[in-house]
Amino acid sequence: MALTRYQNLCYRLLGRRASRSSQIAYIKRAIERAYIEVRPEAYIAYAWMNGLIGAAAGVAFLLVYLLVFPSIGLELPPKLLIIIVPAPILMGAMAYLVTMMIPESRANSRKKDIDNKLPYALNFLAAMASAGVTPAVAFKSLAEQPIYGEVQKEAAWIYRDISIFNIDIITALRNAANRTPSIKFQEFLQGAITTVTSGGYLKTYFFTKAEEYMRENRRMQKEFLDTLGVLAESYVTVVVAAPLFLIVMISVMSMVSTGSMGSSTLIMYMVAFVMLPLAHLGFAVVISSMSPEV
């Protein structure tokens, strides 16, 4: 994959230093697991440049606060200096760390997608093995099926190693097991290597693993439905009943007590416009992060 203009500039400016970074081994594995086709030193140079730009933005913000605001007569509380002064370091470090965390985040997303689609992909491989095709052809056919998501990409890498780099099937499977972010897929590949080297039947192995992963998938679906029931009860209690009870109680107290109308109105505004949206967002994020693919 070609670098963008910005990434190419980063590599030309910082690539030589980045190639000697102690983070090379870590970022190489991370971008392989994330399926990011960028050289490790190019990505480290990109992260360094993002950190430098973040620090420059922090310096600009500090200069605006110290020079521009006083010149226009805008005075801000002196306590803000505790946050403003370290802004260049904080913004630079944050930009660098976020950039370095992106591959691991993508790798985790790929892991979830592989684990979700692996049982169905194994059924496809088992069907191909039943037709008597070789493992290389089976993985080639799987690589042509985009419906299997990230498993299709893993199969494409395996077939690429075999067809383009002329690597034998055992080494190609071993390389794929080393770079995949999914423990399940890694175990499946290691079992396939053992089956091939011991002279076993891949058809039987594929069917056995597909059935095993389908059982595990059904168990996970059942656990998710049970958890979803608990979350639904919690949602009714925390987001529906509790705010209504709180609003009614505050309204009654404001009518009984004189002089507290302003604070009661503020609390009700906080409940309606801050607490409720955050509670809805929190439940949505939790359910979205834990929901398996059907």
Image (tube, helix red, strand yellow):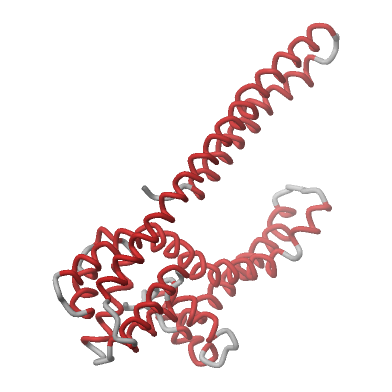
Using the image as rendered, state which of residue 251 and residue 136 is in the foreground: 136
Examine the rendered structure and indicate whether residue 24 appears above or below residue 287.
below
- On screen, residue 271 versus residue 186, left or right, reads right
Examine the rendered structure and indicate whether residue 20 appears above or below residue 228.
below
- Place of residue 14 in the rendered image (x, y in percent of width and height, measured from the top left): 51, 86
Q: Quadrant of residue 216?
A: bottom left
- On screen, residue 168 versus residue 106, left or right, reads left
Q: Residue furthest top?
A: 256
- Place of residue 31 in the rendered image (x, y in percent of width and height, measured from the top left): 45, 76
Q: Quadrant of residue 142?
A: bottom left
Using the image as rendered, state which of residue 69 and residue 280 is in the foreground: 280
Identify the residue shown where x is 63% and y is 25%.
272
Identify the residue shown where x is 60% and y is 65%.
57
- Place of residue 137 in the rendered image (x, y in percent of width and height, measured from the top left): 18, 77
- On screen, residue 13 versus residue 82, left or right, reads left
- Place of residue 108 in the rendered image (x, y in percent of width and height, measured from the top left): 49, 64
